[in-house]
Amino acid sequence: MSLGTFKTSEALSLGVELELQIVNRHNYDLMPCAPDLLRLLEGRKLPGLVTPEITESMIELSTGICSGYADALEQLGEIQQALVEAANKLDVGLSGGGTHPFQHWARQRIFDKPRFLQISELYGYLSKQFTVFGQHVHLGCPSADEALYTLHCLSRFIPHFIALSASSPFVQGEDTGFHSARLNSVFAFPLSGRAPFVLTWDEFEHYFDKMTATGVVKSMKDFYWDIRPKPEYGTIEVRVMDTPLTIAKAARIAAYIQTLGRWIQTERPFVPQEDDYLVYTFNRFQACRFGFDGTFVDPATREHRTLREDLLRVLIKLEDHAIALKSDPALRELLADVSSRGNDAQWIRETYAREPHLPEVVRLQSARWMAPQAS
């Protein structure tokens, strides 16, 4: 199968995708209600899409093409309102969070769609264990080679995105000790991890042709990389974030990725090289396990510092680019998260410490996500 040409897109345009939990309002376990939600939304005009995910207790919303932070937040808010109205009609809740704190994967039902059924047949029980919830952000790139350059530069910041969005400390009723346990489920898939180190589209097409010749992959959808190119959109897609507990946080993280993209594409601060990936899996694990307190090893200087220290340095460095994109309010809020408020995983743990009953935690999570423009 041909990879196809890399579509032209507007540089630094955004698209945001959020996978959401559908919960029963009686016991706040997951509820297989996606087909009913989708039926209620049929024919409703939205700025983006609402589509099924692999199991029936999940739903995915996606914006259209966004110019920046304010546009992304507005589109997310409009789709959120439509989803909340449909959920209320069915008397179900919707929630953010990278994992549901106490659901059991064996009870989940695969959504009746050919691709999902094929994945289930191939991966067995891993398919139901993939009932985890992430945020994906598409970033527009002016050319295929620029997309690969931006991808490899952004890979340095994968731990930032994980720590900022982390919202999955509990799995099947247990505190895992991780800030983002969701990514442990993603790592189980054989084509997860990092993209190959190639810097031209000709090289990438050669790699893709070799992979398809093996019969292992048929399309880019078969790669579960942390960041992958999406030639049909003219974007790269950052895929490591947990779904935040609010749409406001999701929009802020998208704004951070856009601001980093502007810095990378205009100032070209890095010369990507294979050795940048020597500490990649270490840094990623530290972010998943410890959040902002994880250790970050600078791939260029080999200096060790905390993720909190590295995030604060980068967020401050990006101020001029944030102002140019009108995303400075978003980055100021992220600075407050890093310096004092903490991430959503911390909020979940603190809520459980006050209300040591996981259904109550999910109830509060759901109320937070369904509130208009919650912070």
Image: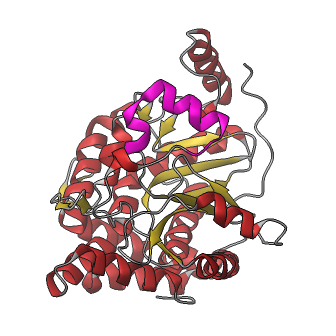
Residue farthest to the top, as pictured? 213
Q: Position of residue 143 (x, y in %)?
A: 73, 43
| Residue 279 position by quadrant | top left
| Residue 201, placed above or below residue 109 | above
**Foreground residue among 136 and 208:** 136
On the rendered image, what quadrant is the N terminus found in? top right
Q: Is 267 placed above or below 87 here?
A: above
Q: Is residue 266 visible?
A: no
> Please, is residue 137 above or below residue 84 in the view?
above
Principal secondary structure, stretch drawn in magenta: helix
Residue 121 included in the magenta stretch of the image: yes
In the picture, measured across the screen, residue 32 lies left or right of residue 27, that is right
Q: Is residue 156 left or right of residue 267?
A: left
What colour scheme governs how the chains and residues are painted in the rendered image of this protein? Answer: secondary structure
Identified at 47% across, 63% down, the residue is 31
Q: Tell which of 83 and 252 is nearer to you.
A: 83
Q: Which residues are magenta?
A: 111-129
Task: Using residue 284 as the reference point, say whether residue 211 is left or right of it.
Answer: right
Residue 86 figure quarter: bottom right
Image vertical order of residue 231 relative to residue 61, above or below:
above
Q: Is residue 296 magenta?
A: no
Image spot of residue 141 (x, y percent): 69, 51
| Residue 87 locus on image (x, y percent) | 60, 76
Q: Is residue 240 left or right of residue 8?
A: left
User: Is residue 185 among what the camera can see?
Assistant: yes
Q: How many marks?
A: 0
Residue at image coords 55%, 68%? 254
From the top left corner, tell me how far across and down residue 239 is, in percent.
Answer: 49, 51
Question: In this orientation, which residue lies closer to the viewer: 276 or 308?
Answer: 308
Q: Residue at x 57, y 74 (%)?
A: 321
